[in-house]
Image (cartoon, coloured by chain):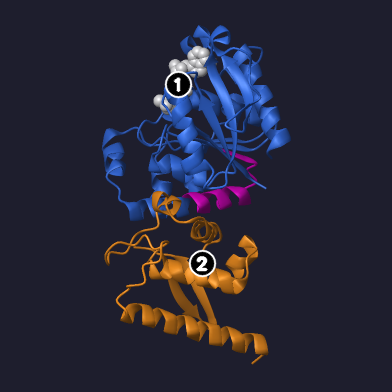
Amino acid sequence: MSEKELLEEILENLQQMNEKLDSFIGKKETAPDQSKKGNIAESLDIMTLLSLPDHLRTTATTLFEIGPATAEEVSKVTLKERAVESNYLNQLVRMEHVEKYREGRKVYFRINEK
Amino acid sequence: MTFALAVHSSKGGTGKTSIAVNLAAAYALDGKNVCLLDVDIRGPSLCSIFKPDTYFWINDMLSGDREIKDTIHDVSERFGTKGKFFVGYSNPDINQIRELARKDRSWQSNALKNIIKGKKELSGKNIDVIIFDTSPGVEYESINAVAASDIVLIVHNSSIACHNCTDQLIKGIYSPLNKQCAIVDNMCHPNVLGPSEEKRFGINVIAQIPCMCNVATRNNEILSLTDPDHVFSKAICSMKNKIEDFYM
Ligand SMILES: Nc1ncnc2c1ncn2[C@@H]1O[C@H](COP(=O)(O)OP(=O)(O)OP(=O)(O)O)[C@@H](O)[C@H]1O
Ligand SMILES: [Mg+2]
């Protein structure tokens, strides 16, 4: 395993821990960019997308345009760091606008289908 | 590269459909492959203008039941255009309109995915220009089309309400979606408008089309095709050239 892959694995694990912690503390962490109300998943329709803060809107718009993608692929379009995009994508996952799934060794994100 | 253009306005009846249809015809005459799509699902117009025989509608593409290629119709031979001219119709049947008006947000989220997918498919079919004829204001179908477009052509009339609502659309929809915009003043009264502006809200005003009764009385024709020397047709042609020069 290359150093880069190892680091990505660690980052991925950290993010998963982060998510678990979030659910432990009862989603008390309501950052200003968490427009999610209650526990009902919100479809990411265009009106909801428009109400997202700039950085998350850019990430979500990119995901609409390129379809299911890795954080790396999204970051190539938005010209932001992979780790930054990964963070935004995971925020969108926590808001239930985006789904995360694994294919082989790669983690993919796609707009949530309800 | 396929270039998608949404013809939109804050208020109704500003001339979006007239401009979308004539602009599509002007591109096709010029040898571009064009696809004109009616996304004014609540108040369809293109069916009344083109009177097609069709089984599949833009509605079916939005719902994901049909691929876009099954819902568009080639009218190039009928109008003798140099480039391909396709039209996609939205279903004027009231039951269909009622059905779509009930759709929820997750359906609309998928509709946006399907429009973006349709755009990619058309791009694979060598379509140069896609023109969306939208419904006015903040309707899902219109804003989805705006989101899938490269440029928004804002059709404006001289009312204060239209001016104020456009300002809101720019701030709350077009800018947050990073869309390029161009303004067309339609049905202008030169003596009311005063000196013509080059920019409004920081956006280029690319055409000012006067109010002409015979545009309304001849609305069963596509003037760009039947009367290329008409003031309206010439304005459309100049608009087409400006879009090509500045935005494409
Ligand atoms: N420059 C013009 N001068 C006079 N009449 C015009 C002009 N442009 C359009 N019209 C007429 O105005 C009417 C409304 O035009 P049109 O249907 O294109 O507007 P629209 O914006 O598509 O309306 P809607 O918001 O209902 O979709 C039509 O009868 C059309 O022929
Ligand atoms: Mg119309």
Q: Amino acid at mark 2?
A: Pro
| Residue A44 position within the rendered picture, expressed as x and y whole percent measured from the top left | 40, 57
Magenta segment, which residues?
B115-130
Mark 2, residue position? A68
- Establish if A2 lies above or below B77: below
Q: What color is chain A drawn in? A: orange
Which residue is located at x 58 percent, y 83 percent?
A8
Mark 1, residue position? B160
The image quadrant of residue B233 is top right
| Residue B170 position within the rendered picture, expressed as x and y whole percent measured from the top left | 51, 38
For the residue carrying disc 1, how many other residues have a C-alpha within 10 Å: few (<14), some (14-19), or many (20+)? few
SS assignment at label 1? helix
The dot on residue B36 is none
- Residue farthest to the bottom? A1
- Establish if B83 lies above or below B185: below
Report whether residue B82 is seen: no
Q: Which chain is blue?
A: B
Which residue is located at x 40 percent, y 38 percent?
B138
Q: Amino acid at mark 1?
A: Ile
Which residue is located at x 45 percent, y 73 percent?
A100
SS assignment at label 2? loop
For the residue carrying disc 2, how many other residues have a C-alpha within 10 Å: few (<14), some (14-19), or many (20+)? some
Q: Chain of mark 1?
A: B
Left or right: B228, with B162 as reference point? right
Return the residue nearer the eye: B222 or B213: B213
